[in-house]
Amino acid sequence: MAIVEVDEQKHEKLFNSFGVKVFASINELNLSEIKFDLASVCTPNGQHNEHADQMIDFGKHVLVEKPFSLYAPETEKLIQKAKDKNLQLFGVMQNRYSPPSRWLKSLIEENRLGNIYSVVINCIWNREAAYFTESSWKGNLHQDGGPLFTQFSHFVDTLYWLFGKVEITHAEFQTYKLGAYIEFEDSGLFSFRLKDGGHGTFNYSIAAYESNLESSITIIGANGSVKVGGQYMNEVQICNIAGYSMPELDASSPPNNYGPYKGSAANHHFVYENIASEFNGKTSMIATAKEGAAVVAIINDVYAFRAKASNDN
């Protein structure tokens, strides 16, 4: 195991924390004696594609932190390159491992809710100025991309995982609180059509007062209604389905705790366990690179409305 960190002032702290060699560049790591099979790319969003591409050139399997990239065509090219080199490319879509999410997936696969009429997703979180000033890339349009990439791509993935590709019909964006620190919106919403005819809305914000408020999904179908909510889409709050009794689910993982703020469920260990099982031929991946590209494509479709609004102004 080894770490690549371009900021050499952090090397001593990283070594003391993890007890592994720390390199200043990917090339330096590649030229070292360190032997490894899998590289995990956890760099700024806008650099994910570049760094994953470098690791593939060095013959390594790659796990890419969300989002895969800021542009779906980049990810599609990366997927093809890995395939051509007979290498595996994985993505972090950690919400798929949460018990309530897996329960929702089973409901949809078993058609328990019947025809889906409406889906409502609310993601209302808090990020303060200090979050954006601690790193130069956060808040930058071309490195961060916006809340749907950095804070809420896991919940866009939940939408895609449950219902497949959606058609974005409308989107709007506002900056209420953080305009001095970001080059994009701190709040927004988009409407969509499901491929089978239902409709939905996705409302999001990072302008909540003091702390994260909620991440929830409500699904209304012909045979019932369900809602999974809580701060991190981790609690089944409503289960009203014809002829169905709610099963007991495993406990959800706590949120990732970054000190001043919190993120989605701490499910990364499940991702690595899934990868190890895939390498050993025991299971298939819960989240594939193709699906990661599809999530980026949905966000690109939403943000096409943002780009149009900017051009119109």
Image (spheres, rainbow, N blue to C red):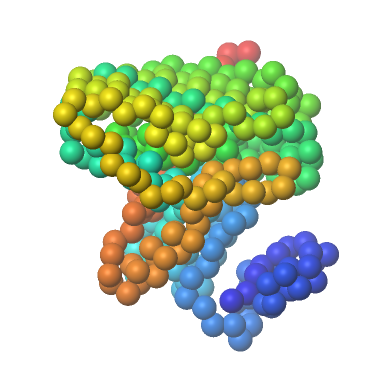
Image side of residue 26 versus residue 288, left or right: right
Residue at 46%, 31% (x, y): give it.
229
Q: Is residue 254 above or below residue 227?
A: below
Nearer the observer, 213 or 173: 213
Residue at 67%, 77% (x, y): give it.
20
Count of marks overlaid on the render: 0
Q: Residue furthest bottom?
A: 33
Q: Is residue 155 above or below residue 6?
A: above
Image side of residue 178 versus residue 302, left or right: right
Image side of residue 254 versus residue 237, left or right: right
Nearer the observer, 226 or 44: 226
Quadrant location, the C terminus: top right
Quadrant location, the N terminus: bottom right
Image side of residue 50 versus residue 250, left or right: right
Residue at 24%, 23% (x, y): give it.
224
Q: Is residue 213 above or below residue 35?
A: above
The picture places residue 176, in percent across and down from the top left corner, at 69, 18
Residue 40's quadrant in the figure? bottom right
Q: Residue furthest right?
A: 9
Nearer the observer, 178 or 294: 178
The picture places residue 116, in percent across and down from the top left corner, at 25, 23
The picture places residue 247, in percent across and down from the top left corner, at 28, 41
Q: Residue furthest top?
A: 313
- The reply to whether residue 31 is in sight is yes
The picture places residue 220, in percent across and down from the top left corner, at 30, 21
Nearer the observer, 130 or 54: 130
Q: Is residue 85 above or below residue 210?
A: below
Residue at 52%, 60% (x, y): give it.
52
- The reply to whether residue 69 is in sight is no
